[in-house]
Amino acid sequence: MQINISSLIGYHLEATDGEMGKVTAFYFDDVTWTIRYLVVETGNWLSGRKVLISPDAILKESGKTGSFTVNLTKSQVSNSPAIDTEKPVSQQQEAELFNHYPWPNYWEGGFSSSGVWGILAPTSSTNIIHETDTDHPLLSADSNTHLHSTKVVAGYNIHATDGDIGHVKDFIIEDHTWKVIFFVVDTHNFFPGKKVLLPVSNIQEVQWNDSKVKINITQEEVKNCRLFDIAEFTQW
């Protein structure tokens, strides 16, 4: 099933011992175009601190009623590494998260064997990354940020092969894999009232410093992309 990211904003997260908070944004990686974390605002119980939760923590069949249930306790969340969720996440910060939580390392083989919705197996020694392990790909000297917030990228300009054509409005994901399959592009400055679905396969380059997405098709081809109908994507 396909769903638009913006429809998940405001979803509540339930820990095993009570309500944790609500979803305010998502982080995706810019290599595989996959959602890696939910940004969760914890509310009064943790002084409103925002934390990152992997989709791997979400239990199967949750998400039907405007909330997700996760296989974490509030204590686990409160003791998690502090990360500024308003900035891109560095690979070092990600390593700290994976040392704290029992999540499988997606950089070593993808999602858990039971699938993204499955209950996770206990952490093994092979899942631990130590700060002294400088040979690990996440901690190498040339490591940099590769996770970006949907909240920030929404609004980036879309640049076709023959000029600007609109801006990023939303993202469409596959619910079981959390892979981003389309950018929703608002072209109203060029084609009034028109929002289209741009396959991520058409993205040539993202210029993060310039807030620009370069694509490999023309303005006319963008105009002829599949129209975005919000009614098709808002039901989990």
Image (cartoon, rainbow, N blue to C red):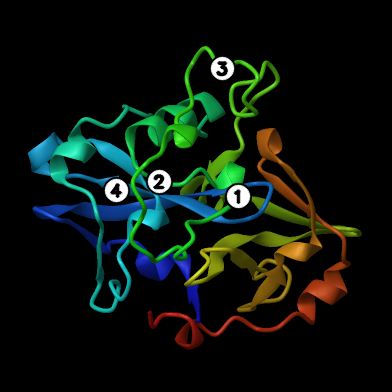
- Circle 2: element type: loop
- Is the residue 32 above or below the residue 179 in the image? above
Residue 218 left/right relative to 164? right
Say the numbered circle drawn on residue 133.
3
Q: Position of residue 105 (x, y in %)?
A: 51, 43
Give the residue type at disc 2.
Answer: Trp
Q: Is residue 75 left or right of residue 66?
A: left
Which class describes the residues within 10 Å of circle 3: few (<14), some (14-19), or many (20+)? few
Whole-percent x, y for residue 172 in the image: 55, 70
Residue 207 in view in this figure? yes
* Badge 1 or badge 4: first in the primary sequence: 4
Distance between the alpha carbons at the discs numbered 3 and 1:
19 Å
Residue holding disc 2: 103
Judge the density around disc 2: few (<14), some (14-19), many (≥20) Cα neighbours within 10 Å: many
Q: Which residue is mark 1?
A: 109
Q: CA distance from mark 2 to mark 3?
A: 19 Å
